[in-house]
Image (spheres, helix red, strand yellow):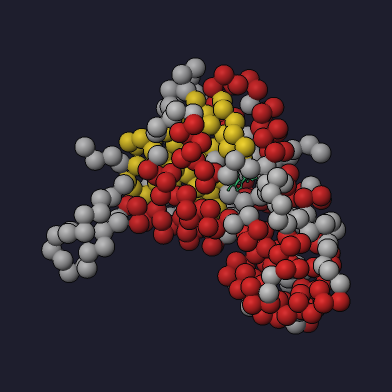
């Protein structure tokens, strides 16, 4: 299957990274290499790009896509949460820009065997890293009712989380839940009829919750932002594209904390906590796709780009 993926907010990211031709850049979610290719085109022979992805198929696709720039590209199969170690192993101390374009690629979503899509019948899988052993099937069949409830409530904000968890647990007593369509059917029956009439895909939110849980998406993001800012050179920029409100909230809060980490009570005349700002949020409001992009690429619909610029105090 061909690796098809249209890069989201491409021009905005390239402008947002403010690329220096001799700089070092990290793409933490390489995917098909769409953003990376445009970064490479702007780098001189001295510039460098480190591309990270946890999906072998993405690594293969990006290696091919970036073949004309191979001298300045290093591709690493890993989780971006390991960025410190990855850079240390490459003898890189600081970088000039980092990009995260979160979530799944169209390739992962459209490839039936990967089990991400509620529109295709397949084995329940949803692993971004197919070398890991735990799958969506393990979560659905092994989590307790309380764990399922909390996961669906917290990662999808679905108001029927409790009932969905109950239905899953009841059904798996009869038979192990193995496929996306079996799960879809169970969720469908846990939703009131009048909601089903207006919501054509009520299973969508639970599928998202399972994917986030399995791939630890929010924890990985939350744990990585501060490290990434620390790894930037002066004026280096961290660009993050999110696709749902849970991710966007994390980015917004962590960026703000890095801009203003002071914990002193507001009525203190001077700061005594000693926490120093690491830079500035460039995007007061997130950058959204243009009407043109929205028309051309439905995946861009919920995309939001936020940018942080590092400032090193002398
Ligand atoms: C939306 S796609 C990126 C598309 C890419 N920007 C492009 O233009 O082709 C997201 C990619 O990030 C990868 N990914 C998601 N979370 C990751 C993580 N924590 N560590 C490494 N890769 C991750 C996924 O496997 C997927 O290939």
Q: Position of residue 247 (x, y in %)?
A: 53, 58
Q: Position of residue 248 (x, y in %)?
A: 50, 58
Quick check: can you spot residue 290?
Answer: no
Q: Is residue 175 left or right of residue 265?
A: right
**Placement of the C terminus among the 4 image quadrants:** top left
Quick check: can you spot residue 148?
Answer: yes
Locate residue 230: give its quadrant: top left
Whether 107 is drawn above or below 161: the answer is above
**Placement of the N terminus among the 4 image quadrants:** top right
Locate residue 204: give its quadrant: bottom right
Whether 55 is drawn above or below 199: the answer is above
Q: Nearer the viewer, residue 219 or 17?
A: 219
Going by the picture, which residue comes out furthest to the left?
269
Locate residue 206: give its quadrant: bottom right
Residue at position x 70%, y 45% in the image: 131
Q: Nearer the viewer, residue 265 or 92?
A: 92
Residue at position x 68%, y 46% in the image: 129
Residue at position x 45%, y 33% in the image: 88
Q: Position of residue 291 (x, y in %)?
A: 59, 50
Q: Is residue 296 left or right of residue 12?
A: right
Q: Is residue 103 left or right of residue 2?
A: left
Q: Position of residue 268 (x, y in %)?
A: 16, 66
């Amino acid at each position: 299957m061909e690796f098809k993926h249209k890069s989201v907010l491409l021009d905005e990211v390239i402008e947002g990274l403010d690329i220096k031709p001799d700089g070092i850049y990290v793409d933490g979610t390489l995917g098909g290499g769409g953003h990376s290719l445009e970064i490479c085109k702007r780098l001189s022979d001295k510039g460098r790009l480190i591309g990270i992805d946890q999906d072998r198929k993405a690594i293969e696709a990006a290696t091919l896509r970036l073949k004309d720039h191979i001298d300045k590209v290093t591709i690493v199969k890993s989780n971006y949460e390991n960025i410190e170690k990855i850079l240390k192993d490459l003898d890189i101390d600081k970088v000039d820009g980092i990009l995260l374009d979160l979530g799944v690629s169209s390739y992962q979503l459209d490839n039936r065997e990967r089990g991400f899509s509620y529109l295709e019948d397949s084995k329940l899988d949803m692993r971004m890293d197919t070398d890991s052993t735990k799958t969506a099937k393990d979560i659905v069949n092994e989590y307790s009712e309380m764990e399922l409830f909390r996961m669906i409530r917290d990662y999808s904000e679905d108001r029927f989380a409790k009932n969905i968890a109950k239905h899953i647990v009841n059904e798996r007593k009869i038979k192990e839940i193995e496929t996306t369509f079996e799960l879809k059917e169970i969720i469908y029956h846990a939703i009131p009829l009048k909601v089903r009439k207006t919501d054509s895909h009520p299973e969508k939110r639970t599928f998202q919750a399972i994917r986030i849980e399995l791939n630890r998406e929010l924890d990985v993001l939350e744990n990585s932002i501060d490290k990434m800012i620390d790894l930037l050179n002066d004026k280096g920029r961290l660009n993050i594209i999110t696709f749902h409100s849970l991710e966007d909230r994390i980015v917004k809060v962590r960026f703000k904390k890095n801009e203003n980490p002071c914990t002193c009570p507001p009525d203190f005349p001077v700061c005594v906590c000693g926490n120093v700002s690491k830079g500035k949020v460039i995007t007061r409001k997130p950058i959204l796709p243009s009407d043109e992009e929205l028309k051309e690429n439905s995946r861009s619909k919920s995309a939001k780009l936020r940018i942080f610029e590092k400032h090193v105090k002398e």
